[in-house]
Image (spheres, rainbow, N blue to C red):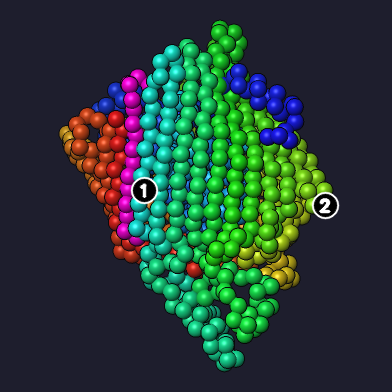
């Protein structure tokens, strides 16, 4: 913080006098749904709506999902991408068990923002697929997934969408009980998982509330069905082994054969994570201010190409010399990440004027990520950043309400080491935005506009680029009956290129590519239209969307045909592209008789993206369908589900196809206390038939399959 400008420090000081997170989830009172079958998608069986400051419900973000409670417990995983991959339109990057970032509607990386309580994660996860997201899912109270026009709330870089992890680290309200404790513990067989989390909330008197939490998670190398490598990769490795043996390289041939025959357990796929957080908030009427501190520490193995590991061009050139000289081989690659973070939230009641209140949310993060080769330190990534927003929330005047606000972020990025493929850079962003709503009873109209100024500079050749971007959305919904809505959104979103896309120049070992940035890249923009149906028809819950986006100057990596350091050279280029897709979920009661309810749950999604030259955009996930039956009776919920992922044969040049796979999952949840959901014991088996599966969105799908059959037991309590 010592190099921050006086203007920035002044804005931080102003924020201390102001207030709160931009998106909130509101629980409907339990009595509103007391007579209905229990929902399979929320906590404590209440309805959760996503809202924004000054807007009743955020229909302008049509592709919205929220998970919490029993669903969050059932989908628990060490990385946020794996937690969310059951939601329609969401998959995971699946680089490794310790690094799996969410992919929304086929897009990931810099096009998807991962947030904590509405503020960016401020880490290096967007720069590389092998970098973990610095958000611990164990501390999540709930998770919001926002797609489409969500860029208006969270920044134009979220052109693919945003994932907002909601925590209680800054107490959201004064507790009404002397002490409230939430706890979670879990174990499994496929990774020898041992995890636990505990949080405590308590009022301190005088309007103060206190929170403290901690968690720990540890896994061994994961069990997998069959071979780690795909059949085609195994054939290549065995052929290479035969060539090495003919040339007299017996040890190399044996290593390649050993890699080709690796099976049942994925080497170097262990993980370990620890987190700690505490917060304090003061409440006075409708005003409040709070601050929190948290620490997150994770280490994880990075599985390498079987028999080869992580290729380094220089090492390949010295192959024979190293073999003859008997030099010590490098150990397996692992990553250690530490992150310290401070957050501030405040809200100031403005009385009965045009503006109801002003709210603010700020986060500061100090992040260090170290890549190890055995015990030797390789590349170190340092990220220090601050991000914040201030919003003036309008009081309702007749049919209108809304908010206006400003957002600021400053991120210092530095990578030191042989694989520092991105030079030191500073990205600074300032934005102003407004979101307005007009309520005509059955018809609601929402409109939003956002302007951003972004500067990206690097410190080696002292290059700097500045961008001005404009985004907007106009949405209208019509209430057909009760709470069932038909809506359409029109949007225009613009994204400034990232530092990696502009200035990269070096070996990117995670993707086995030599990446070259393009400092002449222009703004990426997209026009979009989306139609949706959402709500309830009696006891049937429906959420379905169909969308199309037209991209101008879509940024992508293209192979040049050149080679550098033993790696194929890829360069960031631009051309137009278009995308379309659909996604949906329908939950319906098949039988409801007294205390027994049998629910059906159908989900599916498909997206297709094509460049102007006719080539498919790389790593777009295939058609995905799932169906589940859930029996709810007395103290038990019994669920059986089938997930089917189609083969992906629509691939970019040099991209390999992915086979289809089907997973069957079973779970039994026990709620031992009548009339309360403060204790849930969950027993589950994932991938019951131990079927092999690989995510097409993964850079490492050729040698990192999904986990095999896994028996899990977890306990979640709140009292």
SS assignment at label 2: loop
Mark 2: few, some, or many residues within 10 Å (few <14, many ≥20)? Answer: few
> What percent of the width, then of the height, locates residue 474?
61, 31
Tell me which residue sits at (51%, 18%) in the image.
Answer: 288
Which is more toward the observer, 715 or 328?
Answer: 328
> What percent of the width, then of the height, locates residue 181?
33, 31
Q: Quadrant of residue 243?
A: bottom right
**Residue topped by disc 1:** 195
SS assignment at label 1: strand
Which is more toward the observer, 154 or 474?
Answer: 154
Give the answer, above or below, for where 616 lies relative to 136. below
Is the C-beta separation of discs 1 and 2 under 8 Å?
A: no
Give the answer, above or below, for where 15 lies relative to 317. above
Which is more toward the observer, 31 or 537?
Answer: 31
> What percent of the width, then of the height, locates residue 515?
70, 61
The magenta stretch spans residue 42: no
Tell me which residue sits at (59%, 24%) in the image.
Answer: 360
Mark 1: few, some, or many residues within 10 Å (few <14, many ≥20)? Answer: many
- Number of dots carrying numbers: 2
Sequence-earlier tag: 1 or 2: 1
The magenta segment is 173-190
Residue 334 in view, yes or no:
yes
How far apart are the alpha carbons under marks 1 and 2?
A: 46 Å
The magenta stretch spans residue 176: yes
Disc on res. 521: none
Residue 574 in view, yes or no:
no
Tell me which residue sits at (65%, 22%) in the image.
Answer: 13
**Residue topped by disc 2:** 461
Quick check: 643 left or right of 34? right
Tell me which residue sits at (35%, 51%) in the image.
Answer: 194
> What percent of the width, then of the height, locates residue 154?
60, 35
Quadrant position of the C terminus in the picture: top left
């Amino acid at each position: 913080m010592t190099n921050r400008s006086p203007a920035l420090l002044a804005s931080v000081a102003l924020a201390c006098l102001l207030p709160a997170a931009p998106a909130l989830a509101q629980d409907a009172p339990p009595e509103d749904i007391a007579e209905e079958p229990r929902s399979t998608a929320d906590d404590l069986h209440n309805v959760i709506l996503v809202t924004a400051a000054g807007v009743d419900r955020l229909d302008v973000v049509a592709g919205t999902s929220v998970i919490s409670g029993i669903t969050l417990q059932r989908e628990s995983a060490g990385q946020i991408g794996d937690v969310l991959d059951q939601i329609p339109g969401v998959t995971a990057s699946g680089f490794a068990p310790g690094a799996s970032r969410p992919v929304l509607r086929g897009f990931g990386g810099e096009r998807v923002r991962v947030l904590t309580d509405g503020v960016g994660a401020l880490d290096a996860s967007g720069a590389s697929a092998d970098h973990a997201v610095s958000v611990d899912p164990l501390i999540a109270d709930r998770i919001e997934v926002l797609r489409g026009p969500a860029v208006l709330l969270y920044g134009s870089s979220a052109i693919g969408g945003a994932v907002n992890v909601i925590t209680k680290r800054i107490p959201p309200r004064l507790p009404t009980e002397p002490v409230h404790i939430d706890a979670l513990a879990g174990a499994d067989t496929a990774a020898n998982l041992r995890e636990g989390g505990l949080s405590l909330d308590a009022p301190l008197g005088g309007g103060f509330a206190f929170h403290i939490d901690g968690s720990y998670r540890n896994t061994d190398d994961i069990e997998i069905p069959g071979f780690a490598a795909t059949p085609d990769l195994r054939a290549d490795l065995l052929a290479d082994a035969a060539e090495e043996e003919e040339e007299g390289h017996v040890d190399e041939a044996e290593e390649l054969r050993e890699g080709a025959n690796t099976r049942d357990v994925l080497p170097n796929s262990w993980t370990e994570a620890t987190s700690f957080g505490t917060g304090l908030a003061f409440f006075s009427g409708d005003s409040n201010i709070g601050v929190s501190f948290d620490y997150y520490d994770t280490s994880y193995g990075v599985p390498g190409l079987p028999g080869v590991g992580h290729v380094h061009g220089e090492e390949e050139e010295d192959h024979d010399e190293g073999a003859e000289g008997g030099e010590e081989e490098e150990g397996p690659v692992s990553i250690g990440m530490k992150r310290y973070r401070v957050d501030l939230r405040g809200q100031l009641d403005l009385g009965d004027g045009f503006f109801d209140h002003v709210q603010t949310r700020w986060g500061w993060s100090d992040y260090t990520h170290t890549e190890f080769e055995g015990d030797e330190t390789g590349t170190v990534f340092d990220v220090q950043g601050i991000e914040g927003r201030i919003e003036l929330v309008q009081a309702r005047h007749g049919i209108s309400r809304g908010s206006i606000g400003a957002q600021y972020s400053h991120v210092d990025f530095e990578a030191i080491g042989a694989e520092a493929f991105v030079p030191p850079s500073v990205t600074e962003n300032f934005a102003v935005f407004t979101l307005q709503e007009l309520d005509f009873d059955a018809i609601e109209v929402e409109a939003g506009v956002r302007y951003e100024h972004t500067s990206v500079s690097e410190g080696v050749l002292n290059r700097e680029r500045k961008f001005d971007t404009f985004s907007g959305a106009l949405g209208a919904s019509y209430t057909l009956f009760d709470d069932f809505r038909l809506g359409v959104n029109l949007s225009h979103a613009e994204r400034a290129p990232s530092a990696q896309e502009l200035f990269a120049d070096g070996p990117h070992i995670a993707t086995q590519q030599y990446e070259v940035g393009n400092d002449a890249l222009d703004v990426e923009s997209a026009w979009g239209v989306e139609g949706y149906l959402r709500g309830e028809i009696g006891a049937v819950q429906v959420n379905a969307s169909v969308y199309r986006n037209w991209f101008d100057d879509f940024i992508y990596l293209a192979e040049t045909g050149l080679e550098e350091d033993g790696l194929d050279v890829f360069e960031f280029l631009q051309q137009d592209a278009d995308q379309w897709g659909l996604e949906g979920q329908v939950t319906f009661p098949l039988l409801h008789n007294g205390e027994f309810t049998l629910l059906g749950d159908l989900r599916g999604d498909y997206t297709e993206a094509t460049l102007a030259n006719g080539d498919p955009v790389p790593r777009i996930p295939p058609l995905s369908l799932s169906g589940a039956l859930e029996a709810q009776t007395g103290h038990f919920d019994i669920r059986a589900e089938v997930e089917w992922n189609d083969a992906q044969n629509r691939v970019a040049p040099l991209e390999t196809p992915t086979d289809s796979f089907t997973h069957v999952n079973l779970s039994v949840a026990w709620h031992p206390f009548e009339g309360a959901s403060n204790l849930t014991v969950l027993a589950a088996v994932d991938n019951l038939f131990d079927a092999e599966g690989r995510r097409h969105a993964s850079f490492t799908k050729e040698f990192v399959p999904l986990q095999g059959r896994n028996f899990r037991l977890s306990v979640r309590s709140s009292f």
